[in-house]
Image: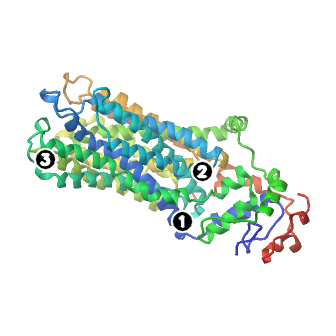
Amino acid sequence: MATTTGVADDVPYTLDPNERRRQALAQIDNAPFGWRHVRAVVVAGVGFFTDAYDLFAINLASAMLGVAFWQKVGGKNAGKIPSNSDTAIKISTATGNVIGQLVFGWLADRVGRKRMYGLELIIMIFATLAQSLSSDSPSMSIVGVLVFWRLVMGIGIGGDYPLSSIITSEFATTKWRGAMMGSVFAMQGIGQFAAAIVALIVTAGFKESLMSAKTVAVCSGVCLIAVDKMWRVVIGFGAVPACAALYYRLTIPETPRYTFDVVKDVVKAGEDIDAYIKGQAEGHPDEVLRAAALKRSGDELRAPKAGIRDFVAYYSQWKNGKILLGTAGSWFFLDIAFYGLGLNNSIILTAIGWGGGANVYEIFYNSAVGNLILICAGAIPGYWVTVAVVDTVGRKPIQLMGFAMLTILFLVIGFAYDPLKKSNNGLLALYVLAQFFFNFGPNATTFIVPGECFPTRYRSTSHGFSAACGKVGAIIAQAVFGPLAKKGAAPGSSDTPFLNHIMEIFALFMLLGFFTSFLIPETKRKTLEELSGEDLYSSSPESVIVPEKWVEGRNGQNPDPETLPPV
């Protein structure tokens, strides 16, 4: 039964707010896995599904954009999007990610998780629909319009990283917290899969129109109209799952840890925990008692107040600063190679017989099916193997193993690149293995660990900073290594003669990621308070059991706040 004291009936009501905090949070940490946990994973996971869909869909849609808007350039480049325009559109999303991760990460610590959760989804929905309705004009190119809207969409996607991670983390049971957070992140693989499926469906839907043109350079009339509709559907569909999840995000309760440690509202936090355990939306404490408790015990909670001075003091200690360096550095090195590996996609698809085609229909069909094969072969299995073992093997061993395997794989790909291209699927096998060990490795753990190892007052900010460092790495991969891969190629050629050396460089980044991983702690089966040192705030030798006359509300009557003794 919920009580006006904000503490469940089976938890002794103590006067000391620090002990009450410890007892209440223990209910979340030790709760058996149930539907409330599944709901939290689904609500957060749908957002990550949308994130991955929107990020991956542009890879499939960019070829369609070339047909729709670059038919008039003539020559051998007709119907193909220029590489600099393609890069600008993709980098704009990553740039927006950096902004969103930093801003939403900070705001979630400043004003609360609940107030920000859902806002980032609204931004994503609006920007996604705006993209799908975009076109060029005499005063503005389609590239400029898409760069703007993908920047805005990227801000929303970036905001989803810290918010989904920490909300899942702060509501999770300690025993299965890694699996819950990993399941949220694994929805990225499902989102990529869905993007390829939608591209395949729209391609099949316009089959007759697409078959009327042999190449993208001569796609006109009904073919051109069909392709213009296709890219809009592929991009616009990303708003559908986001709309489905919006209501649940806007109505999710504030996390009790934030209410305890930042708002310092003991009564409300206790009621919210009691409601969460019982599968209810949120608690509804007696407001008179709540106001009295805020006035009397707010200053007694030992959690430090967040601020610039406290932030600097906290992270200037090496034991704390090294963890942030480890999470941010590992994510940075990871994303350089993770996004850089995509430079091989066209070569891999050709190698497995899913590149090109006899007409425009076959070109788009092969691209969609080829990407489905690659996603199902390496990426999706890697995500879910992590979910299965992350709470038994641990985060740190998985991350170290992943970086070590990726270092070896990139060395082999780089130094044996030409023989592998000529072999029967040798490059494909190494590519699939790399995708597997990215996701059964640092791509998953760099998302999980920052949501666990920092104090509540800076957890979202620190996760956002770590994620932003990763997206800076993604920008470098696309803006620097993408053009560098064409070093030595003939002007206008799509060849990538320098790609083997780039793979060797990526091996170095994976080795650096291996070393930065030693800076992070093992978080398996530890409470968030143990990991951040916040368990010390509950060590109170002065906890007092309150006499029954002061907690008559536990028997259905509201206690008189004036009868409570001074705290």
Instruction: For mark 2, give the secondary structure.
Output: helix
State the quadrant of the C terminus: bottom right
Q: What's under tag 2, amino acid-wise?
A: Arg
What residue is drawn where x is 43% and y is 44%? Answer: 403
Q: What is the C-alpha distance between the residues marked 2 and 3?
A: 47 Å
Whichever of labels 2 and 1 marks the residue nearer the N terminus, that label is 1
Residue 210 is labelled as 3
Instruction: For mark 1, give the secondary structure.
Output: helix
What residue is drawn where x is 80% and y is 68%? Answer: 13
Point out residue 156 in the picture as x, y percentages from the top left corner: 47, 44
Give the side of residue 18 with respect to residue 490, left or right.
right
Specify few, some or many for label 1: CA neighbours under 10 Å numbering under 14, 14-19, or 20 or more.
many
Instruction: For mark 3, give the secondary structure.
Output: helix
Whichever of labels 1 and 3 marks the residue nearer the N terminus, that label is 1
Q: Which residue is labeled 1 in the image?
A: 37
State the quadrant of the N terminus: bottom right
Q: Answer with the quarter of the image where residue 563 lies.
A: bottom right
Residue farthest along the bottom direction in this orientation: 555
Give the side of residue 315 with respect to residue 385, left or right.
right
Residue 424 is labelled as none
Q: Which residue is labeled 2 in the image?
A: 115
Q: What's under tag 1, amino acid-wise?
A: His
